[in-house]
Image (spheres, grey):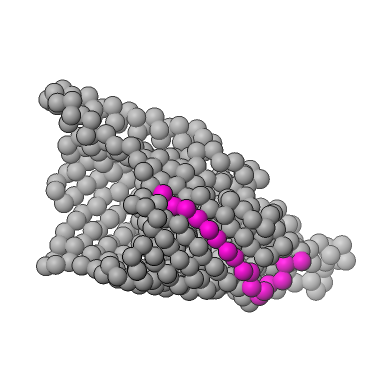
Amino acid sequence: MVQQHTRRVSAAFATCALAFLSSHARGAEAPAEAALRAWKLSGFGTLGMVYADSRSADFTSSVLRADGAGYTRAWSPDVDSRLGAQFDLHLGAWSGVLQVISEQRPDGSHAPQLEWANVKYQLTPDLAVRAGRIALPVFLGADSRKVGYTIAWVRTPVEVYGALPISSSDGLDATWRWGTGSVLHATQAFVGRTNQRLRNGLRIKADDIVGLSHSIERGAVSARLSAASGRLHTAIGEELIVGLRGIKPAGDALADRYEITNKRVSMVSIGMSVDPGAWFVTAECGRTRTDSLLGGGTSLYVGAGLRRGALTPYAGYAQVRADVPTRDPGLPLDGLPPALAAAAVRINAGLNGFLAAIPVQSTWSAGLRWDAATNIALKLQLDRVRPRQGSRGTLINNQPDLRPDRAVHVGSVAMDFVF
């Protein structure tokens, strides 16, 4: 169970932390002031409200939500609101971090969950290794995607970051920092696994996660290139797969193609940001692929803004398109007995219902950020979200009267803060 796994991660983190605390204490007795400086407690959060004019689906920032704005309620605080706390410990070559976040979960609760819980050892000034629950280094904002204060817009673009809604994994990583002239490099290799609870008792597991990420910085320019893969296991669509296997032999071939059991998923992404201070431009694109009901697609976004004192007006565009067919002829009906043919029609409709959930969507955004204080930012953002090509896009809780290709207009207000 996720809670049991979380407790195991917490226990492992605590054990490692106590171990190197004891080791440090045996090595030397630090002054009280130095001991206090080794510990740091910080936090962050977003208080937001989102309005969507759809009454046939919910707009949300992640598929790992129970609901959003639109169908469930016109105004929702759960799309962006969260509260997080982080505890850091530094003792020489050893350090550790524990981050807990409370936000709406797929079951509708706001129970706090561990986002990070890891111990790091600095082998050399340039090489470090970590063990525990670690952020997946797949996007530019991998280490801060849940800290709204660090980004100009209200939320990271759903079309791009929604391709990997799971933001951390349990495992190991190693980071080597090096330089070439004025360019700073960071090369990170990682392995791990994740086990995420979805709604209605469903879970999604990813085993054998392995990946490589490379970041560069040179003055106002930063960039990251990442590649990762893993093996997915989930019971999503299980009833459909059982139905397909009941109509042989065509059903077996379709079931083998679409079931999400031991299926390899791969993802690559590249992003770049230019931020000299008075203005900024950021762009990212990525591609995800798995031979299953989840399909795969290519996504991108570009955003830009101007800083004028405490005010930052900004605009952006994002899109995601499917790289696999979003419809399938399904089971052939010719030659089937009437009762079996009727069942095949229902199964084919169910199959195409799943495929229609592979997102094809574009979003235009415009907004304004006001840095009201050194640690508080107020934001207003307007979005025009348009699913395309018969897809339901990234909307959730879709109703039978949902009209694909109809734009959804979204308004968001948020207060981001750090402490």
Q: Would you say residue 382 sits in the magenta stretch?
A: no
Residue 114 in the image, given as x and y percentages of width and height: 44, 40
Quadrant (top left/top right/bottom left/bottom right) for the C terminus:
top left
Task: Report whether 9 appears left or right of 400.
Answer: left
Depth order, front residue of 183/7: 183
Residue 405 in the image, given as x and y percentages of width and height: 66, 75
Quadrant (top left/top right/bottom left/bottom right) for the N terminus:
top right
The residue at 83%/66% (across/down) is 341
Query: In the picture shown, does residue 153 fall above or below 201?
Result: below
Residue 266 in the image, given as x and y percentages of width and height: 44, 62
Q: How many marks?
A: 0
Depth order, front residue of 91/291: 91
Residue 290 in the image, given as x and y percentages of width and height: 51, 63
Residue 307, quarter of picture: bottom left
Query: In the picture shown, does residue 116 fall above or below 369?
Result: above
The residue at 18%/25% (across/down) is 32
Q: Would you say residue 407 sits in the magenta stretch?
A: yes
Task: Report whether 361 appears left or right of 239.
Answer: left
Which segment is the magenta one? 401-417
Depth order, front residue of 386/44: 44
The residue at 37%/52% (across/down) is 373
The residue at 62%/50% (across/down) is 66
Query: In the picture shown, does residue 105 fall above or below 1?
Result: below
Task: Check the image and name the residue furthest to the right.
Answer: 338
Look at the image and tell me whether residue 397 can be seen: no
Look at the image and tell me whether residue 190 can be seen: yes
